[in-house]
Image (spheres, rainbow, N blue to C red):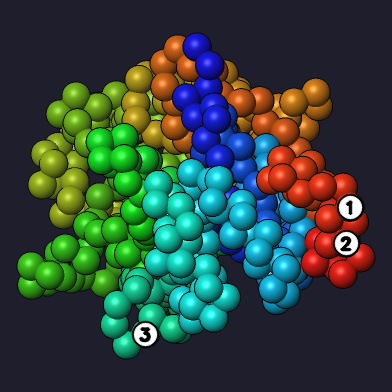
């Protein structure tokens, strides 16, 4: 079977991660995605991996992940000629994706009303920081602010109530938000199949942050009483806590079926004496004396390295997982076997596949992300521009 989205024409007129990430998922299933970025330095996302504090590498890893499979068009949208090129492409496109500020779209004349007038079948995918209604629609937002901080996730993900709020990692809100926008685009395409008409679809960082934090936010909406997160060694349940091994690596336990697994865990840890200890016999007892049980487990886990514990707990069928570092993930054999990590086409360098699949359908083998304007000429020729017109666009620095 051919790729599901073969023949679908997509314009990625976005920047950074979330909106372009949705285009990347479309490309994984066969869509032809044109990445529009300004001449010169291109999309600011190209430089994120070089910012202080991020891992250093010879590869522009953020760009490789979020813009694979795309064709690059460097276009100066500040010029009338550049806007004319974009509108000609939009006339022929199925999907137009942007996260430009709403005021910028209006100023350039590339809002939904303008482009749908040129192409009534167009699916216009709008991504914003704070939505498209309300007093703060013009407020700039990134995943660290609109998704992470504003949603309550930053406050809730402290190590414990006495520590500062937790700072998110780069792209941690953008990537799940990209999946939301992808879902909205597919809904728009499905509606078009039914009606023959295009529509505007969208999502926002704020909406995705609230959704990710939904369990706690819904509790607040229901007037629930909240309790401060305790330090790790004072957690209310020793069987859902995390522990340091002898090699300073960590294991996370999630033992929920305690009737079956509590004795097994105690035996695995070499602490059979705890099974009949009056403090820990019943579940309520283990809750009441959780701090003491955590101390017992701390001492036990400190006697072996994590690989040993991983085998012991795994062989016993217990629910746990290693607390992996980014360096650990790249050798995760299950992630490789399951197709979570896949190689770039004709390369040994690996990347992360989008987290969706359809049985019987092969996804596109990831191709390296484009250089700035790498495919400008071929894209313009496909849009009907002659070689002479293309040279004029280059000479005027409308296209690079």
Quarter where residue 33 is shown: top right
Graded by Cα atoms within 10 Å as few (under 14), some (14 to 19) or many (20 or more), the crowding at tag 3 reads few
Residue hosting label 3: 136
In the rendered view, would you say 156 is above or below 326? Answer: below
Which label is found at residue 392? Answer: 2
- Mark 3 vs 2, N-terminal side: 3
* Residue 380 locus on image (x, y percent): 75, 48
Graded by Cα atoms within 10 Å as few (under 14), some (14 to 19) or many (20 or more), the crowding at tag 1 reads few
Quadrant the C terminus occupies? bottom right
CA gap, disc 1 and disc 3: 46 Å
- Mark 1 vs 3, N-terminal side: 3
Q: Is residue 79 visible?
A: yes
* Residue 49 locus on image (x, y percent): 74, 59
CA gap, disc 2 and disc 1: 6 Å
CA gap, disc 3 and disc 2: 41 Å
Q: Residue furthest bottom?
A: 135
CB under 8 Å between discs 2 and 1: yes
Task: Find numbered disc 3 in the image and state the secondary structure of the residue it sits on.
Answer: loop
Q: Is residue 242 visible?
A: no
CB under 8 Å between discs 1 and 3: no
Residue depicted at 22% across the width and 63% down the height? 216
Return the residue nearer the eye: 305 or 10: 10
In the rendered view, would you say 117 is above or below 359? Answer: below
Residue hosting label 1: 388
- From the viewer's perspective, tell me whether residue 210 is left or right of residue 179: left
The mark lying in front, picked from 1 and 3, is 1
Residue depicted at 67% across the width and 31% down the height? 366
- From the viewer's perspective, tell me whether residue 258 is left or right of residue 146: left
Task: Find numbered disc 1 in the image and state the secondary structure of the residue it sits on.
Answer: helix
């Amino acid at each position: 079977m051919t790729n599901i989205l073969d023949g679908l024409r997509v314009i990625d007129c976005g920047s950074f991660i979330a909106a372009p990430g949705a285009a990347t998922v479309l490309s994984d299933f066969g869509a032809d995605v044109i990445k529009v970025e300004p001449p010169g330095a291109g999309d600011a996302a190209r430089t994120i991996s070089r910012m202080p504090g991020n891992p250093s590498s010879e590869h522009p890893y953020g760009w490789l992940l979020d813009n694979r499979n795309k064709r690059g068009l460097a276009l100066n949208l500040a010029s009338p000629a550049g806007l004319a090129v974009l509108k000609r492409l939009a006339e022929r496109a199925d999907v137009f994706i942007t996260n430009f500020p709403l005021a910028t779209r209006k100023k350039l004349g590339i809002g939904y009303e303008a482009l749908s007038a040129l192409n009534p079948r167009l699916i216009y995918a709008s991504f914003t920081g704070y939505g498209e209604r309300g007093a703060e629609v013009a407020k700039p937002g990134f995943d660290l602010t609109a998704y992470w901080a504003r949603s309550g996730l930053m406050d809730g993900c402290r190590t414990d109530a006495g520590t500062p709020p937790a700072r998110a990692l780069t792209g941690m809100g953008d990537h799940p938000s990209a999946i939301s926008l992808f879902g909205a685009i597919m809904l728009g395409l499905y509606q078009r199949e039914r009606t023959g008409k295009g529509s505007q679809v969208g999502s926002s960082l704020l909406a995705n942050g609230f959704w990710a934090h939904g369990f706690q936010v819904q509790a607040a909406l229901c007037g629930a009483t909240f309790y401060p997160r305790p330090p790790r060694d004072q957690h209310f349940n020793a069987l859902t806590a995390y522990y340091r091994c002898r090699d300073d690596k960590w294991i996370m336990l999630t033992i929920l079926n305690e009737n079956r697994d509590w004795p097994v865990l105690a035996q695995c840890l070499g602490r059979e004496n705890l099974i009949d200890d009056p403090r820990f016999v019943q579940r309520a007892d283990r809750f009441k004396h959780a701090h003491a049980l955590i101390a017992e487990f701390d001492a036990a886990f400190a006697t072996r390295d994590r690989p040993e514990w991983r085998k012991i707990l795994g062989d016993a069928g217990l629910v746990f997982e290693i607390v992996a570092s980014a360096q650990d993930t790249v050798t995760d054999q299950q992630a490789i076997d399951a197709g979570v990590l896949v190689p770039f086409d004709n390369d040994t360098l690996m990347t992360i596949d989008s987290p969706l699949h359809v049985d019987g359908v092969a996804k596109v083998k990831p191709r390296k992300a484009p250089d700035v304007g790498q495919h400008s000429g071929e894209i313009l020729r496909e849009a009907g521009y002659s070689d002479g017109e293309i040279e004029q666009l280059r000479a005027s620095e409308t296209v690079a």
